[in-house]
Image (tube, rainbow, N blue to C red):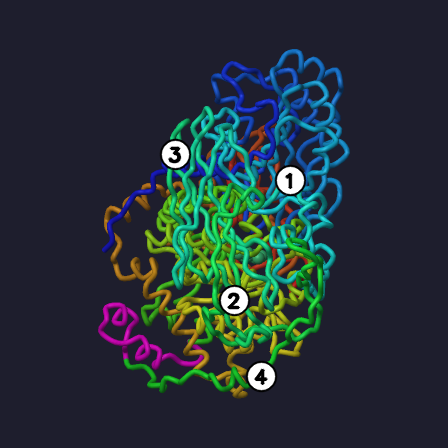
Amino acid sequence: MRDYIKLDQEKYAALARQAAAEGCVLLKNDKATLPVRKGESIALFGRSMFHYYKSGLGSGGLVNTRYTIGLLDALKEHDEISTNESVLDAYENWLIDNPYDEGQGWGKVPWSQAEMPLHEELVRKAAEESDLALIVIGRTGGEDQDSKDEAGSYRLTELEEQMIATVCRYFPRSVVILNTGNIIDMSWLEKSDPSAVLAAWQGGQEGGHGVVDILTGDINPCGRLTDTIALKADDYPSTKNFGDLKTNIYEEDIYVGYRYFETFAKEKVLYPFGFGLSYTDFTIEAELTAIKSESISVEATIINRGYSAGKEIVQVYSEAPQGKLGKPVRVLVAYGKTEVLKPGESASITLDIPKTRLASYDDSGVTGSKSSFILEAGRYNIYAGSDVRQALKVGSFEQDFTVIETLEEACAPVTFFNRLKPVQREEGFFAEGRQPVPLRTVDLQKRIDDRSPEEIAFTGDRGISFGEVYEGKTSLDDFIAQLSDEEMACLTRGEGMSSPKATPGVAAAFGGLTDSLADRGIPVGCCADGPSGIRMDCGTKAFSLPNGTALGCTFNDDLVRDLFVMLGRELRKNRIETILGPGINIHRNPLNGRNFEYISEDPLLTGKIAAAQLLGMAESNVTGTIKHFVANNQEAGRSSSDSVVSERALREIYLKGFEIAVKEGGAYSVMTTYGALNGIWTAGNYDLCTTVLRDQWGFHGIAMTDWWAQMNFEGEEPSRNNTAAMIRAQNDLYMCVGDSATNAGNDNTLEMLEKGVLKRAHLQRSARNILKFLLGSLAMEHKSGRISDQELKEMKADEDQVADRENLTFYRINAEGTDIDGSSMNTSGGSEELFGITVRTFGMYDLKVRYKSDLNVLAQVSVSVFMDNQLIGTLALQGTEGEWKEQTLHMGMIFGTNHFIKLFFPQTGLDLESLTFKLEREFNPLG
Ligand code: BGC
């Protein structure tokens, strides 16, 4: 039994606040505009001041928080700063007629909100009254939709630009705060020239506090850009191929972000990778101190030469010889952050860097070592400094040709294209050349056939329970030998969303979902979105964290780890085995709608920050599911588009973060993408899920699909039913179906088994992966009674927050209409009723409510109906003087099997007899 450590909400909030602050990147600070001095008055502009974006939208943002501290809240809390009330009043009045536009929902939410036109007079007066101006620009992001290089999306709107320009004209000290998911177009900067700019990203529920800590100098800015900010979206080499619904050619190859700009187009950079200012001045003196056969060391001394205390980050880059492969002129190979240094104080950091980080992958064989990570012969220059541009040469060494690791070709493209390669014109100057991409040379089908797993001889039931395996009395394989094909097929089906068999409101349950699997003692595990905190659609409150970009910008693995120790405890408290995150796709292009969830354009930083998260959560025996594996770099056509990528770019860029998360973070749960990689949908991609992930990296966990993903056999069209392709690839769990026992998703597992396309051994292999996960899981700790009484007591103590999974009723909704008894519901003022519905036929539904109230007709006894924590509508009922009446609420589309319905009764006086869900029109968008 493990020691229970209570989740300390205050400590959680303090760490999140620190992370939100350390994630802020100060881009500009002329005339010492910041920090705000004690006693100063601030005029606040921009409607986003009133709508702080704590995160983006979609699965990565749906955390129900107890509170959110936006910027305005945090400023108002601060005693030593005052805000200009007349400007605030002007906004408040304007917002009455210009409320927040929610758009049409999932995938159709506006990325920005209309800005208030500013009257010069208001600004002029404010400038007389206040010492400085803060102007907030807000942008959200989300699923199923990318940003566009247009006003209101990646670019500012005319009104936003005018607002900045007007305010800057009147205020000598004006700070633009970017409350955006990730980087945006900055061309307005030159025109209006604000004196300071702070990229504050989306800082979670403590975000406002974090930003204000930076504004006041309580925390000295110490965040650094995880992406290059170029002059225009078109400057990114991936832009021209971005957004195609069918094929997305990764022509820029490994030259992503700073790897491209520093090599080919330095002049197109506005802010380089790793950039960020401080209120103090640091010097970094670094030296390459050790050159060993497998590693090098850089020692850096950082001195605070300024007037305020703060942290500094040392970044180390390598420059490998161009050799035969061609290389970017800079690759981040290490970073380190100091503690707070007082003025005059110094610190030393030693960074030991394995040479693997300097290696390149030869996917063509041109160096004589195909499919290997190698160091080409020649001189390696090492640079260190405060960003990729500032980093100075600190040493170099001569290296012989060395093979670091020999792998075997995997996931290579089958579609021809020419990829980018540097052509040296003169010393230090490279032009963009092209080189044919090496195509796949292996017979994939033969590889799959040759590597068919060994079958465990079927024994039928021998009465071995899962508990006996857990206790070490017998082997897992002996247990698996008993499982029928049908049972194993069920095991590979996750149930969701909001399965009644797991913690209410989570994304999916898996494991012992059917009677027969449960009878064998297999527990039910579950997973919840992620990554910005725990999403529970029934309304359970959870903690909302700073977004992926913000966490990356801290460059602080220790802080991220400490924060995720807290998330681990929160997962444990809510009985959730894995959160669906971190999202670790690479910021290949700034227009990707989900960049806010992801960390960086650099794979080392991405992998390190992800590993820190996983190590933090592991302390509570829970984990993260690293996603989306791999190359999920645009939202447009995310289910249909094929990412055509060289094996080298995969190995060095897109897979690298995942590899670090597996090898250094101990990841044991991974989610594939919706789309295809080099012609094979990742959910059924053998080389990805088996050759690379397991055989080459030694991953021992579960792989799952993204929700309702498609799979294909190479050359065939993808479909949601082709679980045979999934299982053969060793992607273990199909996410997700309404009911695992009845094969509600109509998958082809058993049919293909009968036809011999799939073998029992394949099923046994996935069953083993899933069961192994469960054996070590929190779910098994519960099942085997190994949770301490103290922990169980603490879980119960928070019952008002954590919906009671044992006692929650689920009603099965038939197409003909199902009556739910309302007579025993507690309808007193302020109370809530929560129950689940299981819907078999998807379509448009009505909810008929039969009610009475003994009050007279002027009495208001409304009831609000929420589905999955979204308000569907309020039935504005009135007193009926005792007479039974009916009213109908249009529920709209009900899609997905399980949902939570919450009724909220604001006033006392309503009696319910029944609630009837009635199908009006059948419709299944998945066909
Ligand atoms: C997203 C995943 C998410 C899943 C479950 C999908 O739409 O792509 O990232 O975890 O839904 O909500």
Q: Mark 3: few, some, or many residues within 10 Å (few <14, many ≥20)?
A: some
Compare marks 3 and 2 and give the one earlier in the sequence. Answer: 3
Compare marks 4 and 3 and give the one earlier in the sequence. Answer: 3
Question: What amino acid is labelled 1 in the image?
Answer: Arg
Q: How far separated are the C-alphas under marks 4 and 3? A: 57 Å
Question: What amino acid is labelled 4 in the image?
Answer: Asp
On residue 139, the disc is 1
- Tell me: is circle 1 under 8 Å from ligand 1: no
Q: How far separated are the C-alphas under marks 2 and 1? A: 47 Å
Q: Give the image quadrant in which the ligand numbered 1 is located.
A: bottom right
Q: How far separated are the C-alphas under marks 4 and 2? A: 32 Å
- Tell me: is circle 4 under 8 Å from ligand 1: no
Question: What amino acid is labelled 2 in the image?
Answer: Ala
Instruction: Tell us which disc is closer to us: 4 or 2.
Output: 2
Marks 1 and 2: in contact by CB < 8 Å? Answer: no
Q: Residue 778 appears at what percent x and percent y?
A: 33, 57
Residue holding disc 3: 346
Q: Nearer the viewer, residue 125 or 108?
A: 125
Q: Residue 794 appears at what percent x and percent y?
A: 30, 44
On residue 491, the disc is none
